[in-house]
Amino acid sequence: MRPLGDWLARCPLVAILRGIRPEEAVAVGEALVAEGLVLLEVPLNSPEPLESIRRLAARFGEAEALVGAGTVTRAEEVAAVARAGGRLMVTPHADPALVRAAKAAGLIAVPGFLTPGEAFAQLHAGADALKLFPAEAASPAVLRALLAVLPKGTPVLPVGGIGAESLAAWRAAGAAGFGIGSALYRPGDPPARVAERARILRAALGSA
């Protein structure tokens, strides 16, 4: 499986499709991939999330997009995501057991953290990257300080309240990528609107 770093090099924006329904997942996914956003996360508190993941994974395979689940909180959910074809697991919190479960299932693991202790625990469990969450409770200065003590090259992705106007400051502080939720997709948004927001974010990223 292609490592996370390769996907982030293509585009470091993770599309968080919270609230998406299976019948709209493929059309929205196609709009995002057409704009270069190739990391697609379906939070498990969405309607029928595993079916959305299954459809997206079937549509894009292993080469076009990295599809997976967010808001994973239990080990049995990791197994269900893998069965649906997901290859990415994102958690809202720091749980080394979930990281180990994801790696055992062959998934890329991006657990949430907020403190240095949580960050190191996730890395020791085998995390591929770290999700700084909620980013609203931190700052680019906090990220810069964290990166000074984390192992060199650790990818950290701020998530929570990230929009086009804040990308530059976080990027300058060393963010390897970003999880983008409501600034990109809101339940019921048509693909064209999602694509327009994706273009705005890509332009802001280019300026950063």
Image (spheres, helix red, strand yellow):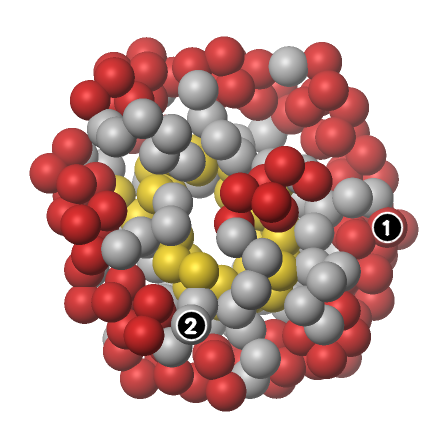
Q: How far across and down, in percent of the image, does residue 40 sit?
A: 62, 58
Residue at the image position 17 percent from the left and 50 percent from the top: 124
Quadrant of the image containing the N terminus:
bottom right
Figure label count: 2
The residue at the point 50 percent across, 87 percent down is 83
Q: In this image, 55 relative to 51: left or right? A: right
Sequence-wise first label, 1 or 2: 1
Identity of the amino acid at label 2? Gly
Q: Is residue 18 left or right of residue 55?
A: left
Q: Position of residue 99 (x, y in %)?
A: 27, 62
Q: Is residue 186 above or below residue 100?
A: above
Q: Position of residue 29 (x, y in %)?
A: 76, 61
Question: Closer to the camera, 6 or 68?
Answer: 6
> To which residue does mark 1 refer?
34
Q: Is residue 90 visible?
A: yes
Amino acid type, mark 1: Ala
Q: Residues within 10 Å of mark 2 (few under 14, many from 20)?
A: some
Give the camera-side residue of 27 and 98. Answer: 98
How crowded is the residue under tag 1: few (<14 C-alpha within 10 Å), some, or many (20+)?
Answer: few
- The structure residue drawn at horizontal position 61% and vertical position 19%, both measured from the top left corner, is 165
Q: Is residue 108 left or right of residue 119?
A: right
Q: Could you tell me how far apart the alpha carbons at marks 1 and 2 are, in whole angstroms?
A: 27 Å
Kindly identify which numbered label has been placed on residue 114: none
Q: Quadrant of residue 145?
A: top left
Q: Residue at x 75, y 60 (%)?
A: 64
Instruction: Quickly name the residue at label 2.
Output: 106
Residue 77 image offset from top left, x and y in percent: 36, 80
